[in-house]
Image: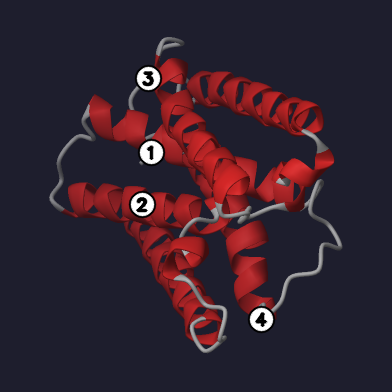
Amino acid sequence: MRTLVNALRLIAVIATASAILAQWLVSSRSPEYNPFNFFGYFTIQSNIVIAVALGVTLVVALRSKREPLRLSVFRGAATVYIATTGVVYNTLLTGAAVENTVPWSNDVLHKWIPLYAVLDWLLFSDRGRLLLRHVWWFLIYPAVWLVVVLVRGATDGWVPYPFLNPSLGYGVVALYCLGVAVFIALMGVLVVGMSRLRIVKV
């Protein structure tokens, strides 16, 4: 079973890296390309984070070491972030016009990797039991990301997603931010609860 799980995680890491690279190769050819914009998307960042988390987990598993709690916290946080990417994209951003999108890459980053990451966390037992206080750690990165995006939106006018556009009014943007924050917190609680399950022993 461990070999199968390791293989699935390796495939997920390769798929994520390939999807990001494919999208970057297309986006970088655009005259408007800006690396700070490309890597400023929560989609790209959350996929990088989950790929790193799964990659480190894979290395630890191959060395036959028990996963340390800090890695479980990191992987739990990564699961929350990538799940947020999947839910937000498939609800708030459905039908949004995005230029230079690579269709298969878009599906991998917004649908398949979020789905796999959640199932990986839910099903496989090789993670430590998290505590509710770890949810606060999960919130730090999204909060910093939101602050940076809002500052950029108010200064150079760039925002990664339409619902964060200052032209909507800061009251509307604040409501969206609050909604996303509440979702991340609830997803964090769910991930903590999942960490206590042992459905498939690895």
Which mark is first along the chain, 2 or 4? 2
Given residues 6 and 117, the one toward you in this image is 117
Amino acid type assigned to the residue bearing label 1 in the image:
Arg
Residue type, mark 4 in image: Asn
Question: Pointer 1: what residue?
Answer: 75
Number of other residues with Cα within 10 Å of mark 4, as a class: few under 14, some 14 to 19, many 20 or more: some
Q: Residue at x 53, y 25 (%)?
A: 194
What residue do we see at 40% from left, 17% from top? 134
* Relative height, residue 130 to residue 31 (above, below): above
> What amino acid type is highlighted by mark number 2?
Leu
- 58 relative to 44 in the view: left or right: left
Earlier along the polypeptide chain: callout 4 or callout 1?
1
Looking at the image, is mark 3 or mark 2 earlier in the sequence?
A: 2
- Tag in front: 3 or 1: 1
Q: Which amino acid does label 3 sit on?
A: Arg
Residue 39, above or below 150: below
Label 3 neighbour load within 10 Å: few <14, some 14-19, many 20+: some
Q: Say what secondary structure mark 1 lies in.
A: helix
**Mark 4 — residue?**
100
- Inspect this view and state whether residue 23 appears: yes
What residue appears at the point 34 percent right and 35 percent down from the top-left corner?
A: 74
Q: Is residue 176 above or below residue 55?
A: above
